[in-house]
Every structure is written in C-alpha cells, then in structure tokens.
DNA sequence: TACACTGACTATATGACATACACTCCTTGA
DNA sequence: TCAAGGAGTGTATGTCATATAGTCAGTGTA
C-alpha cells in the first residue's frame, strides 16, 4: 500500500519493447512477467510471491530482482501485460453512447479474464502505456458531444470506476466459490436483518432484491454492470443535452 | 484476500453490545478495537499489526486472540466501530434526491475521517450492523419514488460504490502527501503522453482536464465526488420518471 | 596466453508478519 | 480448601520482501 512515484519510467517502457535478445535458458523480463501472470490467473493474486514466480521459472527468488526493481514494479508490469487494447475498439461507433458501451464491454471482458486485476494494490493514477490507451479510447468516444475536456475526463473516470467496482464485486462473489456461500449469505442476511431496526432493508430483502440467482451456471453468475451503466449514461446524456443548449 | 464466511456472527454482534464488565486493567474487545482504530487513524492501515495493537495496550501480541478470532475479524470490527450513523440522517428530507445527497455527504465525511476504510481488504458483502443501517437509510431515501425494490437496491449499490471509489481515489492522492507528487504526476503524464498515439488524451491534458489544483489548501484538495454523483442522480431521475409513466 | 572485468545468477541473512501451541497464574465457585 | 477455567504469556513456525555478499562463466584487452 506504500507508494513511491517511480523515476525512470520511460526507460522501463523502453525495456518492454526490446526484442528478446538471446532465447537461451536465460531469465528475461518478459518471462518473469509471464510467469507471474500465469500464477495470478490460475491461483489468484495472493499466490504471486517472488519465491513462487522464481520457482516456476527454475531460478532463485533473488534472480528476479535482476529484471525488476521491486514486487510492486512487477505487479504494475503484470497489469500492463494483460491490458492490451482489443481490436474491437478500433472500429468506429455510431454515437458516443454505443461507443462507450462497447468500451465497457471490452473492459468487462478483460477484467473477467484476469480477475486479479481489481485486487492489485494500486494506488495512484494509471501510467502504463496500455492504461493510457484505454483512457484515450474512452475520451475519443466522447468526441463530438460538445462536452468540455474536463467534463469528458470526469465522465471517463466515472464510467471506468463503475466497471472496476462491478468487476471487483463480481470477482469477490465468484471466488466465494461454488455459489454455496452466496446462498449462505442470502440466508444470513435474511436472518440478520431486524425489520424494526431496518424496515426499508427488510422490505427490499423480502421482495427478493438481494437474492442472487444461484441456479444460473457459474459463468453467468457475474454481477451485472448494465443497470448502473445505463443510469450513468442516462445522466451523461442529460449533461450533453444541457451543454448543447 | 482469502475469505471465510463467518459462522457465529450474531454472537459476535451480541458481544459488541455487552457493557464493559470490569473496568480494571483488563483487556477487552472494545479496547482492542479502539487501539486498532487509533493506530489506523494516525498511521494508516499498514500500521495496524497485531503486535503494534497489543503493544499500544501494554499486552502481548497473542493476548489479542483471546478477544478476536483473527486479524480479519478485527478489521471488520474496526469498520463497524467507525461506521456509526450520524444523527443528520434521521431528519426527514424533502424528496429522494436531497435525501440521497445528504446521505452521500455523510458518507463522505465518514470516509474522510477514516481514510483507511477504503483500503480494508474486504471481500464480500456488508454484514455489520452499522453497515446495514447505512444501507437501510439509503433505501429509505428512495421510498415513494415508485421504483421496484430491486431497482432501489441497484441504485443504492451504484451510489455507495461511487462514494467508496471517490474516497479511495481521494485518499490515495492525499497520501501521496504534500501535493508534490501530484504535481509530479501531472508533469509526468504531460511528458509521457504522445499526441500521435493518444490524441484524445493529449487534447484533454492540454486543455488542463487532468491538472489538479495544487494551490488549494491541503484539506480542500479532495477529489470531488459531486460531478459523478450529479450524473448518477440525473440518471436515476430518468429511471424514476420512466417508471412512473 | 594471461588477466581483469562484468553481468547473471545464487546463497545467506534480516526483520516483519499472522498465528499455532503449550504453558502459568489468578480468580471464582463449591 | 481445592479444583476448574479464564486470561494472558512465551516460544515457535512458516511466509514474505528484500539487503548484501558472494560465485562463476564469458568477454575484451594486454
């Protein structure tokens, strides 16, 4: 959770673009990142320790530090590795709203392919090339709306935050695996909430507003981001209309 | 980040309500929580280790485990301790929107009084009494809008998530203390972003959309949650209007 | 051919951390 | 008076990131 704003960043990105020099049995930055990502994908972010990454590559723990300044840097590089912009986003959209919706869908796909992303102890703003690319695409989608640049930036932050939050919720619910604990939670909540202390909440629970569908297959049981996104975009539409007047 | 859904929860809440039995020099659950909260308030969440909490109380590390099952449980109790509903929210509001806005303001105050809240490694849904109370108040604010219970729940989740996200951003930016690194980031961003690769982002930066006001006093330099909230509530208004038809 | 240098990896060590486990008392109730 | 249990202690284990000091093979220079 400690944060040092990095110094030689450009240098780091340059190193990323270098081709693999000698494909011998040598350790490379790319291999380190790859192993770490694999670990996170299969066993979660907690499984990513310097020791385990090194072991998977057949080297000693400390060898990683030849290629990476700290574990924090490795985590940042993992994010960048995985956050490549999909082709889909290059096609032109008809209007800002479909554009942003497509952007969100792509973001959602990425966040679900690598659920550990939302658990990265990242503090501070995005600075990796791929992250900047995502931001650029979202801003681009708002081109022609008449919004000020500051408003565009605000909208992008809002939308991106929403996706991030929902993905995190979804990942947490999903990793409380097999749905059992979800059902358990529903029951727990139902039993815990006293109608006298919490009448509004009680009513919502009784109406089934907090039931998660436990019968749907594992993959579908993602939390839905659409509802919130629709509200947000409706609100953005209001702003755009007001700006145009 | 590992999650076990707790067993004897009701029992735990009951223990919270018990009056302090003997105010001698004994360790109590309440004192443990209090010391932990003080530590987090002054030195951040990372400073909260079982060892340091115990030291502050003049006991050994292991003594804490007599009152708390795990550090995770302690973190949950810290949150509950600090998340008491303020009186303000009891007064009636004229309409759902002012009601939600008041709710958000109160939430913002709380999150800023204890910035570590947003860094709690909480996975899974809220279950402490005070958290439920907050949810209940928010749902209550939407009473009379004609929304379905499920929609109300969706709106509350959306609004609460937004506050949480903005508080987190604000805390992170604030803890990169003294504003220096914020300015440093602005400069870094400005230098890093290539106008050919990221034209939309470049335009936004050049328009000052990503400048943080470094001249405002420390306390005011909080990230603003109002912009996003206004968009969200505008969107909710659209939904309410559509529902009423 | 000799040698020093360098870059890549290893070995070992440190200090923080959560927490298991086995105790030592002191208080309380019978 | 004594047994029992509760409260707190002491010690130990395993994991973690990472500092520091090697080791060793290959390379360029004399």
Image (cartoon, coloured by chain):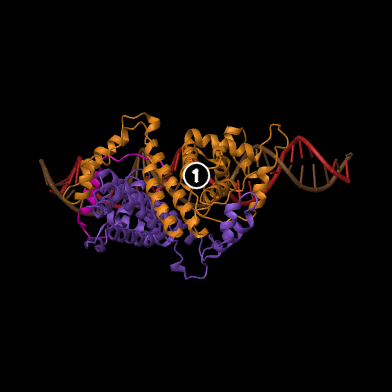
Chain colours: A purple, B orange, C red, D brown
Q: Quadrant of residue B183?
A: top left
What is the crowding at mark 1: few (fewer than 14 residues within 10 Å), some, or many (at least 20)?
Answer: many
Q: Quadrant of residue A45?
A: bottom left
x, y percent for residue B94: 50, 43
- For this view, does B217 lie left or right of residue B33? left
The residue at the point 60 percent across, 61 percent down is A187
Q: Is residue B170 magenta?
A: no
The residue at the point 26 percent across, 47 percent down is A245
Q: Chain of mark 1?
A: B
Extent of the magenta region: A1-27
Nearer to me, C28 or B234: B234
- Secondary structure found at label 1: helix
* B48 versus A37 height, above or below: above
- For this view, does A17 lie left or right of residue B101? left
The residue at the point 24 percent across, 63 percent down is A87
Q: Is residue A4 magenta?
A: yes
* Residue A39 seen in the current view: no
Q: Main secondary structure of the magenta part?
A: loop
Image label count: 1
Nearer to me, A112 or A240: A240
* Residue A45 seen in the current view: yes
Q: Quadrant of the C terminus of chain B?
A: bottom left
Outermost residue, front side: B245
x, y percent for residue A238: 33, 51
x, y percent for residue A141: 25, 55
x, y percent for residue A199: 61, 52
Nearer to me, A44 or B214: B214
* B53 versus A11 height, above or below: above
- For this view, does B165 lie left or right of residue B201? right
User: Label 1 belongs to which residue?
Assistant: B99
């Amino acid at each position: 959770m400690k944060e040092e704003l990095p110094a030689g960043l450009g240098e780091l990105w340059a190193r990323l673009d270098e081709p693999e020099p000698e494909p011998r049995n040598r350790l490379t930055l790319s291999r380190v990142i790859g192993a770490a990502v694999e670990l996170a994908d299969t066993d979660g972010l907690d499984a990513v320790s310097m020791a385990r990454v090194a072991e998977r590559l057949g080297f000693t723990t400390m060898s990683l530090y030849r290629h990476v300044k700290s574990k924090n840097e490795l985590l940042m590089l993992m994010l960048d590795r995985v956050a490549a912009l999909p082709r889909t986003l290059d096609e032109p959209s008809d209007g800002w709203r479909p554009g942003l919706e497509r952007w969100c869908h792509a973001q959602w796909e990425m966040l679900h392919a690598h659920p550990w992303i939302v658990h990265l102890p990242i503090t501070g703003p995005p600075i990796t090339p791929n992250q900047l690319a995502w931001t650029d695409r979202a801003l681009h989608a708002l081109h022609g709306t008449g919004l000020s640049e500051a408003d565009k930036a605000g909208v992008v932050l809002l939308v991106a935050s929403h996706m991030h939050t929902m993905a995190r919720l979804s990942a947490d619910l999903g990793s409380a695996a097999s749905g059992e604990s979800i059902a358990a939670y529903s029951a727990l909540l139902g039993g815990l909430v006293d109608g006298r202390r919490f009448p509004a909440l009680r009513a919502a629970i009784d109406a089934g507003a907090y039931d998660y569908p436990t019968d749907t297959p594992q993959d579908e049981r993602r939390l839905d981001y659409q509802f919130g996104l629709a509200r947000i975009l409706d609100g953005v539409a209001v702003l755009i209309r007001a700006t145009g007047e």
